[in-house]
Image (cartoon, rainbow, N blue to C red):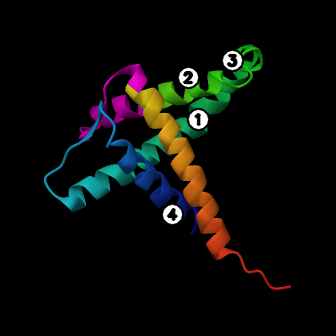
Amino acid sequence: MALLVQLVITAVAVWITTALPGITLEGDDTTAKVLTLLVVSVIFGVVNLVLKPIAKTLGCLLYVLTLGLFGLVVNALLFWLTSYLAGQLQLPFHVDGFWAAFWGALIVSVVTSVLAGLFERSGSDDRS
């Protein structure tokens, strides 16, 4: 259940990024767009699951030297890669360039954190 909730949260975050210039989501109807967002969320999750630990390990020194700001660059590149993979799968989701990916990844990170926090808070049972 938690995996499904995380998938939907990520899909909502990716949908919000489509308001940015340079990030497009096309589709004939709402159902097609929702399905595209869900598939893009799965792709983004798999990319993060597989490549982010490798990037953190290889770029450990850069993370330390930049006090973690290099993580923003890594997230942008992973978001951009997600767009490329979505294009290879003929999905109508596209990110135009590094800066669109940078801001998109930043928004996805913030929105998923906020929504996950709200979901945890509403799902917690505060019995004392």
Element assignment for label 3: loop
- Residue 50 tag number: 1
Q: CA distance from mark 3 to mark 4?
A: 31 Å
Q: Earlier in the sequence, mark 3 or mark 1?
A: 1
Question: Is there CB contact under 8 Å for labels 3 and 4?
Answer: no
Q: Could you say where residue 110 lies in the image, as x and y percent from the top left?
A: 56, 45
Q: Earlier in the sequence, mark 1 or mark 4?
A: 4
Q: Which residues are magenta?
A: 80-99
Q: Nearer the viewer, mark 3 or mark 2?
A: 2
Question: Is there CB contact under 8 Å for labels 3 and 2?
Answer: no
Q: CA distance from mark 3 to mark 1?
A: 15 Å
Q: Earlier in the sequence, mark 2 or mark 4?
A: 4
The amino acid marked with disc number 4 is Leu
Q: Earlier in the sequence, mark 3 or mark 2?
A: 3
Mark 1 closeness class: few <14, some 14–19, many ≥20 residues within 10 Å:
few
Q: Identify the residue position indicated by label 2 in the image.
A: 73
In the orientation shown, which residue stands out farthest toward the left?
28
The amino acid marked with disc number 1 is Val
Q: Identify the residue position indicated by label 4 in the image.
A: 4
Q: Could you say where residue 36 lies in the image, as x and y percent from the top left?
A: 30, 50
